[in-house]
Image (spheres, rainbow, N blue to C red):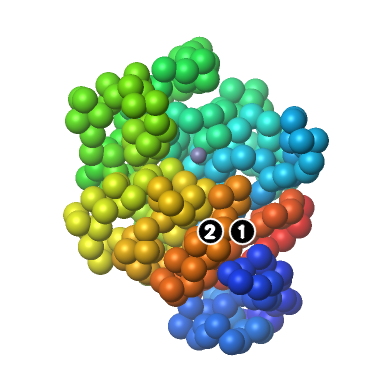
């Protein structure tokens, strides 16, 4: 049995201007449509991906800004819960109350893209309120206080951890089937050593250890990219080519456009929408790259959440205030 849903406009910060968008059926979508009906099966098991943005007061400037980092919540079609990163600890209270408001009591799978604190700084805070059943990471330690704190916290809480690398595949939901393919990292011993000691005094080596993985639910897919730089983007294009194609792209490295987000990568992923949470690097160059690559760039500059919902065939995007 089918029903039609007509949904109201939702405002996004979209490329070049503020446009409105609404739930859409992938095949029916055209960029000029502002209101589209969506056909949805009543009993469909949905994949839901939340990209929340929280506001905080900057310590030095005292101005309000979006909390730094990535923190994405995924509810699988079988209702298991994934977190991909969890922001810097400055957003802890808001993140915890956001998760509670959605009825989250435990995190089944945590995926840490890499050991920078704007991605995993909230792990100890999350563990005061929720259990983490399994922690997946890239296996690369950084020589930092934050890294030590997270490592100790995971050990003290007896969290099961698994190191992921290129070629790994995980069935995250059995019924309906939802799988995760790991595309990166593929690091040498030297890469791992250099990421720890940071001899070049650059963050590049560390960011390039980020987990890159694709979450696939039938025809729908989303590519998570951590903070990879152009070097890794190039390697991924060379190895995977068209297999990088995804419905949605999590924009690499918060939209930094000089070191990350090459045009060829955006073209290769060919995502209809590209989403980021922490717009500190967003500039004209980034917008131009995504416009030329025909991928709509979405992000929030206020306390809102971009929600992507899919039944495995069609998908919808919504932006809500919480
Ligand atoms: Zn980052």
Image position of 113 (left or right of 238):
right
Question: Residue 55 has which mark?
Answer: none
Q: Pinpoint residue 114: horizontal percent, then vertical percent.
A: 42, 34
Vertical comparison of 77 with 186: above or below: below
Image position of 218 (left or right of 126):
left
Q: Secondary structure at mark 1?
A: loop
Whether the residues at callouts 1 and 2 have beta carbons within 8 Å, the answer is yes
Label 2 Cα neighbours within 10 Å, binned few <14 / some 14-19 / many ≥20: many
Q: Pinpoint residue 93: horizontal percent, then vertical percent.
A: 73, 33
Relative depth, front residue between 179 and 214:
214
The residue lying at 60 percent from left, 51 percent from top is: 279
Image position of 131 (left or right of 159):
right
Q: Secondary structure at mark 2?
A: strand
Question: Can you identify the residue that label 1 sits on?
Answer: 299
Q: Pinpoint residue 264: horizontal percent, then vertical percent.
A: 32, 64
Relative depth, front residue between 308 and 248:
248
Q: Earlier in the sequence, mark 1 or mark 2?
A: 2
Question: Can you identify the residue that label 2 sits on?
Answer: 275
């Amino acid at each position: 049995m089918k029903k039609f849903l007509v949904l109201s406009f939702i405002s996004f910060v979209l490329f070049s201007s503020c446009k409105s968008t609404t739930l859409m059926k992938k095949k029916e979508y055209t960029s000029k449509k502002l209101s589209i009906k969506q056909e949805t099966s009543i009993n469909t098991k949905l994949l839901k991906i939340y990209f929340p943005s929280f506001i905080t007061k900057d310590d030095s400037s005292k101005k309000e800004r979006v909390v730094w980092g990535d923190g994405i919540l995924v509810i699988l079609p079988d209702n298991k819960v994934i977190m991909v990163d969890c922001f810097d600890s400055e957003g802890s209270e808001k993140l915890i109350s956001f998760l509670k408001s959605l009825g989250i009591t435990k995190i089944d799978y945590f995926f840490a893209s890499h050991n920078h604190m704007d991605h995993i700084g909230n792990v100890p805070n999350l563990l005061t309120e929720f259990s983490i059943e399994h922690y997946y990471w890239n296996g690369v330690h950084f020589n930092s206080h934050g890294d030590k704190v997270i490592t100790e916290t995971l050990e003290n809480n007896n969290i099961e951890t698994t190191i992921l690398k290129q070629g790994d595949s995980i069935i995250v939901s059995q019924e309906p089937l939802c799988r995760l393919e790991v595309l990166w990292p593929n690091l040498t011993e030297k890469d791992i050593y250099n990421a720890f000691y940071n001899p070049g005094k650059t963050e590049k080596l560390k960011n390039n250890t980020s987990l890159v993985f694709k979450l696939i639910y039938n025809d729908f897919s989303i590519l998570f990219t951590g903070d990879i730089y152009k070097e890794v983007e190039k390697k991924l294009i060379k190895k995977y080519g068209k297999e990088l194609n995804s419905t949605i792209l999590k924009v690499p490295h918060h939209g930094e456009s000089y070191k990350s987000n090459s045009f060829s990568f955006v073209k290769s992923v060919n995502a209809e929408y590209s989403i980021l949470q922490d717009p500190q690097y967003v500039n004209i160059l980034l917008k131009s790259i995504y416009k030329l690559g025909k991928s709509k760039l979405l992000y929030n500059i206020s306390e809102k959440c971009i929600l992507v919902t899919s039944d495995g065939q069609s998908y919808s995007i919504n932006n809500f205030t919480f």
